[in-house]
Image (cartoon, rainbow, N blue to C red):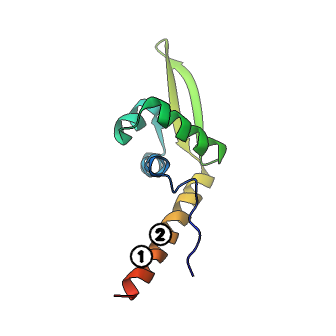
Amino acid sequence: MFKELDPILHSQLRLAVMSLLISVKEAEFTFIKEKTNATAGNLSVQVQKLKEAGYIEVVKEFKDNYPNTTCRITQAGIKAFEEYVKALQEYLKVGQSKQ
């Protein structure tokens, strides 16, 4: 009856990162850090997990002699996010039908 929720996206911070990227397609690490109110270390770990899952691409480069990291959502990431949202909607439908 209930579809299994993607454990990669079920983390609050990873879901926040994906939610941001689904709307902007790509963002700098500092922007994501600011919007999620995460520490750099924690965000870095979660970004790495999303990258390993193939949900985002991470580009590291230098901008005005400073390191700059940009995260981009992939097609696989978009699909996983959409499936996650759809599964959550199914959970809500079941809950609402009980009332």
Could you tell me residue 72's position as x and y percent? 54, 41
Q: Is residue 34 left or right of residue 64?
A: left
Q: Splitting the image into 4 quarters, where does residue 40 fall?
A: top left
Distance from the alpha carbon under mark 2 to that under mark 1:
6 Å
Residue at left 58%, top 45%? 50
Could you tell me residue 87's position as x and y percent? 52, 71
**Total count of labels:** 2
Could you tell me residue 77's position as x and y percent? 58, 52
Element under disc 1? helix
Could you tell me residue 41's position as x and y percent? 49, 30
Q: Are marks 2 and 1 in contact (CB under 8 Å)?
A: yes
Compare residues 43 and 51 and report the one nearer the observer: 43
Residue 92 tag number: 1
Is the residue 98 above or below the residue 40 in the image? below
Quarter of the image with the N terminus in it: bottom right
Is the residue 4 above or below the residue 95 in the image? above
Q: Is residue 62 left or right of residue 20?
A: right
Element under disc 2? helix
Q: Splitting the image into 4 quarters, where does residue 4 fall?
A: bottom right
Quarter of the image with the C terminus in it: bottom left
* Amino acid tagged 2: Leu
Is the residue 56 above or below the residue 34 in the image? below
Residue at left 42%, top 76%? 92
Residue at left 55%, top 36%? 45
Residue under numbered circle 2: 88
* Amino acid tagged 1: Leu
